[in-house]
Amino acid sequence: MKGLSCDLGVAAVVSSDDKILLVKEGTGPFKGKWGLPKGFVDQGELPRDAALRELKEECGLDGEVVGLNSLREKITNGLPAIFIVYDIKVHPGQTAKPCSEIDQVKFVDKNKLDELDWISQTMKSIATFSKPEIKSSIIDYTASQGHPYLLHLHNGGVSTE
């Protein structure tokens, strides 16, 4: 089987009650627009680790991935472009603070999402339809496989490890 290059991005969904953590971009083509903490996966990095890294870099928050939220797929310049979104539970006692590329970080009531200027309709849809109460499971086969190896099961998968 031949490998294929692709554009691989990630985002973090941090929800609390009816609020979701959002960032307002401070630089680049999306300056002034709102979205989830996000970025690209580095070579040799698992996508879930990239989501945690981006959350730390953009918001100063540490946490753990608790499930797979959503996945966007499209073709860009003839190649697959995949965007994986993870549900993340932040460790208690932390305060979100923006980095140099982010103007603002805040929890926004889901009923106020229409008031924001979004990076994209896709990003708004992910925030709008995120349901942290719907659980997924992560089975870590790293030890038995000898390399990073995770299985994400959505809606009721039961982890036995």
Image (cartoon, grey):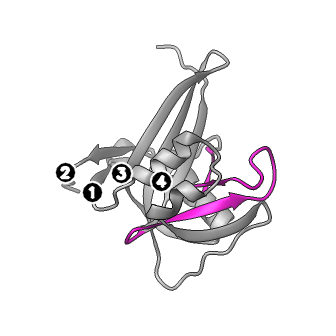
- Whichever of labels 1 and 4 marks the residue nearer the N terminus, that label is 4
Task: Look at the numbered disc 1 and give the secondary structure of its residue.
Answer: loop
Q: Which mark is residue 75?
A: none
- Is residue 21 one of those drawn in magenta? yes
To which residue does mark 1 refer? 135
User: Sequence-wise, which precedes: disc 4 or disc 2?
Assistant: 4
Residue type, numbered disc 1: Lys
Q: Is residue 46 visible?
A: no
CA gap, disc 4 to disc 2?
22 Å
User: Dot 3, crowdedness within 10 Å: few (<14), some or many (≥20)?
Assistant: few
Residue 108 at what x, y percent from top left?
53, 68
Amino acid type of the residue tagged 2 in the rendering: Gly
Q: Pointer 3: what residue? A: 143
Q: Give how far apart the Cα atoms at labels 4 and 3 are.
A: 34 Å
- Residue in the image at 63% along x and 15% along y: 78
Q: Residue at x 55, y 41 (%)?
A: 121
Residues rendered magenta in the picture: 16-41
Residue 105 shown left or right of residue 46 in the figure: right
Q: Is residue 7 above or below residue 52?
A: above
